[in-house]
Amino acid sequence: MTEKQLYSATPATQHRMRRSRVLRTIAAGGVAKVLKLNTFDAKVAEIFAQAQPDALWLCQEHTSASLEAIENQIRAAKIYDVDSLVRVARGSYSDYVRPLEADATGLIVPHVMGAADARAVCDMTKFAPLGRRAVDGGNNDGMFTRVGFLDYLETANKERFVCHQIEDPEALEDIEAIAEIDGVDALFFGPGDYSVRLGIPGQIQAPEIIKVRERVAEVARKHGKIAATVAGKANVKDYVSMGYNLLSVGADVVALATYADDVLSAFDAI
């Protein structure tokens, strides 16, 4: 055996993986608060983490963020005991495990299309017996082999979670089967893409979208899974009443754009 004899630290000296703040909040009956970042500067992540959300949503699906940039944002969040959720690019299994190994607390997997797709995601993101995730342990999440090998495997399955995004009608048709899978930790409703698929782009409060939003929350909570979605300040209470216990409520690009437009409006009267 190599790699420090498979992390041979004794229980008395062994380090532990960081526990998820999101999971702690939800276990205590609370609602996890999330702020989204489209930028990938560690200072922006630190500014948002200082506001004390439960997690920052980082993105590799729709941005040019490198894994190194994401890794530095994760570090910035951890200073303030804030989780990081990385929305991954749909690709090889390495696109899933590398953010976890950089110590992301959770993944957001876009456009899960059905139970077979969800099962494949679990295989890539969960260690046995829940899945078939490849193991290293020599990175940030395993404290560079300081976390004992068996403890690493067990804790990673318990304290790291995967959100399966429900963004397409095909997924809704299979939603009960998706939610029944061990290793599917959360159902994350994406109303924007769903509205596009229904031919009503941007109408995220249309009756058809409201019905799906309610259905996702109902099925998630029925199966003991996290119910997640995006929200604005005006509808947080409504979504919590609907059963959602993880809400993304704001984004850095919205804040920056709003601020820039506002301050420059001082020149409009000149």
Image (cartoon, helix red, strand yellow):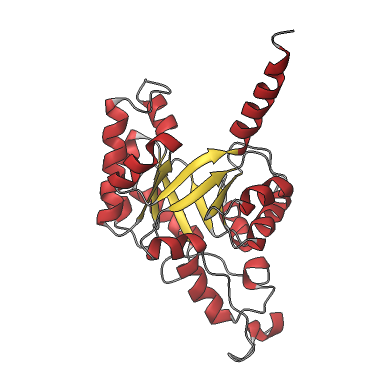
Picture coordinates of residue 114 (x, y %)?
35, 45
Q: Quadrant of residue 194?
A: top left
Determine whether, in the image, residue 3 is placed left or right of residue 24.
right
* Residue at the spot 41% in from the left edge and 25% down from the top edge: 196
Could you say which is closer to the camera, residue 175 or residue 264? 264
For the C terminus, give its image quadrant. Answer: top right
* Residue at the spot 38% in from the left edge and 52% down from the top edge: 245
Picture coordinates of residue 122 (x, y %)?
44, 58
Looking at the image, residue 136 lies above or below residue 122: below
Could you say which is closer to the camera, residue 163 or residue 36? 36
Picture coordinates of residue 136 (x, y %)?
63, 70
Determine whether, in the image, residue 169 is placed left or right of residue 264.
left
Determine whether, in the image, residue 221 is placed left or right of residue 165.
left
For the N terminus, give its image quadrant. Answer: bottom right
Picture coordinates of residue 257 (x, y %)?
64, 27
Residue 174 appears in view: no
Could you say which is closer to the camera, residue 246 or residue 174? 246
* Residue at the spot 70% in from the left edge and 83% down from the top edge: 4
Determine whether, in the image, residue 248 is placed left or right of residue 254.
left
Residue 195 appears in view: yes
Farthest residue to the top: give it. Answer: 270
Total of numbered circles in the picture?
A: 0
